[in-house]
């Protein structure tokens, strides 16, 4: 839109505004003593940086930042606040001196390091010149899918993504070891206010949630299966799907949600996702390729049986597209399973414990 | 024609931004929780509606327009529900409105029917 107002670079102005907003939010986080404010400001920080990443044309990263940073981590941190104190301990000025110097020093070094970074979008930069360029040029030929990010993530660097999936699964195990799976909340006998009774103030919330939860789940699957073509994929879809479950728990109560999506089911699906991902890799080995080499996902005679109407007629020059398509689809499904089930398990762990945490008589941060 | 649409859309988006500014001012200046929620929900509903309408005019008739309309429907579902939940929570936490309690609220607090 630079043409409409001469001498005004809208992108530069937008960058500047967003970055100033980020700095202001960080200063506010550092200044506040209330954990609740800090957590909400951190969600805001993620949202603003997601907007900034969209401006920088990194749609996939922005998507992840928005759903993980602004969505799920805010909820998990709120759960952590429920288990701990709502305010930071007051620290004397002298004890804050050394951390402040350390933080400022590291920040200065990082800013100094950015001076050496290549310009944004510089075609001669190492990231764009060698490997990145090779991926961009070869993806259409190797996989035949338009989203290069998905191609790199799930095929070229499929082993790295398997590692990330295992890390997420390990996070679920870690939280479960510390906090449990939250199953004791199911046996909780406290009587909750009856829905629709005179004391029921949450009708609007429940109706809105009922409308939204199916749409959120549907959108998760759109993001999942559209990941080959546009921004998205298993990680983002998994988090969105988990958010649908978490929203249900926040509005309808943890017990109802645990009856619908059982903790045992959630942790089983988390393990199934990793198993599916690694199993695809092993299948490729069995059929004569390397680990996660989707060109060998199907034996030749089976690949020849796949009818044309699924993905169009085979291109004789590049006969391996189907293996790549199905391989990417399958491992993205594994990522979806693990991410969604892990987020739900972590949420169950925190939420199940927060019911047992000693509740103060008055609302903790009621007087705003 | 395209230029006229651009300026009309830009004007609507600017009007939406003005509403968002007014909402932000209201959040800062209004005296109690409920009036602040009222100001904030102007940002969510009125400001967002005008902005999305403006963006629709700029983008013309395309898939982007459909996506913008879906975003608008989503905002129309979530923002009023969030404002309602916020006001509900404030009321449950014992905040009385700045202008004093309404009779119906006192009845409600005693456990009577609405």
Image (spheres, coloured by chain):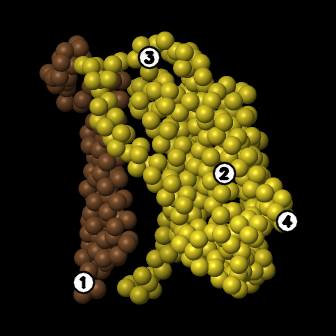
Chain letter of the brown region: B
> In terms of depth relative to the viewer, which is nearer, B1 or A193?
A193
Pointer 2 local density, CA inside 10 Å: few below 14, some 14–19, many at least 20: many
Alpha carbon distance from label 3 to label 4: 66 Å
The residue positioned 28% from the left and 60% from the top of the image is: B49
Q: Chain of mark 4?
A: A
Dot placed on the residue nearer the N-terminal end, 3 or 4: 4
**Mark 3 lies on residue:** A362
**Mark 2 lies on residue:** A334
**Residue A3 on image: x %, y %:** 41, 87
Query: In the rendered image, which quarter contains the N terminus of chain B?
Result: bottom left
Q: Quadrant of residue A184?
A: top right
Query: In the rendered image, which quarter contains the C terminus of chain B?
Result: top left
**Mark 1 lies on residue:** B4
**Residue B101 on image: x %, y %:** 19, 24
**Residue B24 on image: x %, y %:** 34, 51
Residue A99 badge: none
Residue A288 badge: 4
Badge 3 and badge 4 in a common chain:
yes
């Amino acid at each position: 839109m630079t043409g409409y107002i001469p001498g005004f670079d809208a992108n530069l102005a937008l960058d500047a505004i967003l970055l100033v907003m980020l700095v202001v939010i960080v200063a506010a986080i550092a200044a506040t003593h209330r954990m609740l404010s800090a957590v909400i400001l951190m969600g805001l920080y993620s949202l603003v940086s997601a907007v900034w990443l969209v401006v920088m044309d990194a749609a996939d990263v922005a998507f992840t930042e928005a759903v993980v940073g602004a969505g799920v981590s805010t909820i998990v941190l709120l759960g952590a606040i429920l288990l701990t104190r709502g305010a930071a301990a007051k620290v004397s000025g002298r004890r804050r001196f050394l951390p402040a110097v350390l933080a400022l020093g590291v920040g200065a070094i990082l800013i100094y390091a950015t001076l050496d970074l290549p310009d944004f979008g510089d075609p001669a930069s190492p990231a764009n010149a060698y490997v990145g360029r090779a991926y961009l040029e070869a993806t259409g030929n190797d996989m035949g899918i338009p989203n290069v990010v998905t191609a790199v993530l799930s095929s070229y660097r499929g082993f790295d993504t398997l590692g990330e999936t295992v890390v997420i699964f390990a996070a679920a195990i870690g939280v479960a070891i510390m906090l449990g799976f939250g199953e004791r909340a199911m046996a909780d006998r406290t009587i909750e206010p009856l829905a629709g009774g005179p004391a029921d103030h949450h009708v609007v919330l429940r109706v809105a949630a009922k409308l939204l939860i199916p749409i959120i789940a549907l959108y998760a699957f759109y993001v999942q299966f559209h990941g080959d073509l546009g921004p998205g994929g298993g990680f983002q879809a998994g988090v969105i799907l988990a958010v649908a479950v978490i929203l249900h728990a926040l509005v309808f109560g943890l017990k109802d949600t645990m009856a619908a999506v059982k903790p045992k089911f959630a942790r089983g699906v988390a393990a199934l996702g990793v198993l599916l991902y690694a199993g695809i890799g092993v299948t490729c080995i069995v059929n004569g390729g390397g680990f996660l080499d989707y060109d060998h996902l199907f034996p030749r005679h089976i690949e020849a049986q796949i009818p044309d109407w699924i993905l169009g007629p085979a291109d004789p020059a590049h006969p391996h597209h189907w293996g790549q398509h199905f391989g990417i689809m399958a491992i993205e499904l594994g990522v979806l399973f693990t991410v969604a089930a892990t987020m739900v398990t972590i949420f169950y762990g925190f939420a199940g414990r927060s019911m047992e945490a000693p509740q103060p008589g008055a609302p903790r941060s009621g007087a705003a | 024609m395209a230029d006229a649409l651009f300026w009309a859309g830009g004007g609507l988006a600017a009007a939406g931004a003005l509403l968002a500014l007014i909402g932000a001012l209201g959040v800062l200046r209004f005296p109690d929780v409920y009036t602040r929620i009222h100001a904030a929900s102007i940002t969510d509903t009125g400001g967002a509606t005008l902005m999305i309408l403006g963006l629709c005019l700029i983008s013309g008739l395309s898939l982007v327009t459909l996506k913008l309309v879906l975003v608008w429907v989503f905002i129309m579902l979530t923002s009023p529900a969030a404002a309602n939940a916020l006001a509900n929570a404030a009321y449950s936490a014992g905040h009385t409105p700045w202008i004093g309690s309404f009779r119906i609220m006192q009845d409600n607090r005693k456990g009577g029917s609405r």
